[in-house]
Image: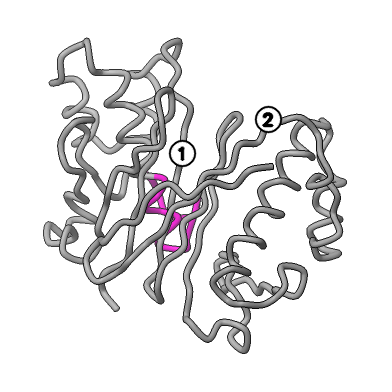
Amino acid sequence: MTVRFVHSYNIGRTHVDIWKVPLEEPSSADDDTSDLSSDEIGRSKRFLFEEDRVHFIRCHFALRHVLAGYLAISASEIRFVCSTTGKPQIVAEQNSRALSFNLSHSAGMALIAVGGKRPLGIDIEKIRYDVDTFSLAERFFSPRECAGLRALPELIRVRAFFACWTRKEAFVKATGEGLSFPLDDFSVTTHPDLSPEVEEVRGNMGAHEQWLLADAHVGNGDRAALAVDNRL
């Protein structure tokens, strides 16, 4: 398995590195679980399908080895703890650099984001042209985002949908609240070719100063976004 460095982003006061992990390479020695914790091994065994099990192992194998490079310790020695909302963190005694990280995967690709102490989130989605963008938008997007999507030319509407989706997912992952943060409680920009921004959060029109977004360019066929909490 080959883990590739993609790009560094200076977003607000935070420097974030992004790494790309291909998940569909031929089986190799990297698919063993020797570097994983007993908890990770147990979770891998709960998957019904072998492909999902292999993807999980490869994601967590890669995450440990990427973080080991920053922390200068063995990948197998890294210990994680979950926040009160369930977001994984490196245990404080090992995290001398106050690193934040996040992991996302879609289809055959995973992304790992590693930055400073400010909470961050990353999301990647495989772009699909067979989705009912309006139906899904009305279900998961805010009224402001739905209006923005409808106002765009049809030619870019699918890309706009996935741009909005990844920006929203990256934001909720950065908050640490995940699915408990209602997706229609905030709005992000929808145009796929313009700089992304958090437009409002629960009526706060100044949220763009507190939450920063960037589109991560990771290759054709995928859409990805990065979010950083700039309040700290």
The residue that appears at 24% across and 45% down in the rendered structure is 187
- Which of the two marks, 1 or 2, is nearer to us in this view? 2
Residue 106 higher or lower than 151, as above or below: below
Type of the residue with mark 1: Ile
Residue 113 higher or lower than 79, as above or below: above
The residue that appears at 66% across and 62% down in the rendered structure is 64
- In the rendered image, residue 6 lying in the magenta stretch gets the answer no
Marks 1 and 2, Cα distance to the nearest angstrom? 16 Å
Q: Which residues are magenta?
A: 169-183
Residue 55 higher or lower than 102, as above or below: above
Picture coordinates of residue 3, whole percent (x, y):
59, 47
The quadrant in which the N terminus is found is: top right
The quadrant in which the C terminus is found is: bottom left
Q: Which mark is residue 24?
A: 2
Q: Main secondary structure of the magenta part?
A: helix
Position of 39 with respect to 159 (left or right) is right
Position of 26 with respect to 14 (left or right) is right
Type of the residue with mark 2: Glu
Q: Which numbered disc flags the more N-terminal residue, 1 or 2?
A: 2
The residue that appears at 81% across and 65% down in the rendered structure is 37
Q: Which mark is residue 148?
A: none
Picture coordinates of residue 221, whole percent (x, y):
43, 23
Picture coordinates of residue 204, whole percent (x, y):
16, 60
Front residue (pair 184, 5)? 5
The residue carrying mark 1 is: 124
**Callout 1: 10 Å neighbours few (<14), some, many (20+)?**
many
Residue 165 higher or lower than 61, as above or below: above
Picture coordinates of residue 71, whole percent (x, y):
58, 76
Front residue (pair 207, 8)? 8
Marks 1 and 2 in Cβ contact (< 8 Å) = no
**Callout 2: 10 Å neighbours few (<14), some, many (20+)?**
some
